[in-house]
Amino acid sequence: MHEWDTVVDISCLGSSLLPPFLSYSNLCMRYLQCDGEAKRVNAILFANRAAASLYLGIHDEALQDCTRSIANDPMYAKAYLRRARAHKASDPESIEIL
């Protein structure tokens, strides 16, 4: 099995949890249970769990997961974007970057 097969399977699992109930807490738990071996897979999983945490308003956990994602794959841009969103959400009065 390629590492991408795992991502596709997990992504499908996560997507199936959302509609129609939008249960981000269930999605967050599923991503927590999934622990791929490849660094790229881990980066994607941590970034996806961070996105679920952002929707739940758990900004500190989102920041930690984004940092873990970046540690696994420094080229994964979504982790940086989500970390910036988590920083902004945790401190809404912070100076915006132009």
Image: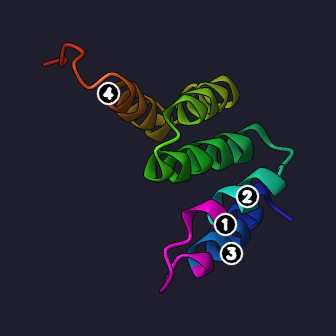
In-front residue for pair 96/57: 57
Residue 72 x %, y %: 70, 29
Residue 29 has which mark? 2
Q: Image quarter for residue 70?
A: top right
- Identify which residue is drawn at 65% across, 42% down: 46
Query: In the rendered structure, which disc, 4 or 3, sits on the residue that comes first in sequence?
Result: 3
Badge nearest the viewer, 1 or 3: 1
Residue, far top = 95
Q: Is residue 44 visible?
A: yes
Q: Are marks 2 and 1 in contact (CB under 8 Å)?
A: yes
- Inter-mark Cα distance, 4 to 2: 24 Å
Residue 97 x %, y %: 19, 17
Circle 1 SS class: helix
Query: In the rendered structure, which disc, 1 or 3, sits on the residue that comes first in sequence?
Result: 3
Residue 26 has which mark? 1
Residue, far bottom = 20
- Identify which residue is drawn at 44% across, 53% down: 55
Give the labeled residue for mark 4. 88
Q: Is residue 91 left or right of residue 74?
A: left
Q: Quadrant of the C terminus?
A: top left
Q: Is residue 11 left or right of residue 79?
A: right
- Inter-mark Cα distance, 1 to 3: 11 Å
Query: In the rendered structure, which disc, 4 or 1, sits on the residue that comes first in sequence?
Result: 1
Q: Are marks 4 and 3 in contact (CB under 8 Å)?
A: no
Q: Give the residue type that dot 1 points to.
A: Asn
Q: Is residue 34 visible?
A: no
Residue 13 has which mark? 3
- The stretch drawn in magenta includes residue 89: no
Residue 17 x %, y %: 61, 77
Q: In the figure, 63 relative to 31: above or below?
A: above
Q: Dot 1: few (<14), some (14–19), or many (≥20) neighbours within 10 Å?
A: some
In-front residue for pair 43/51: 51
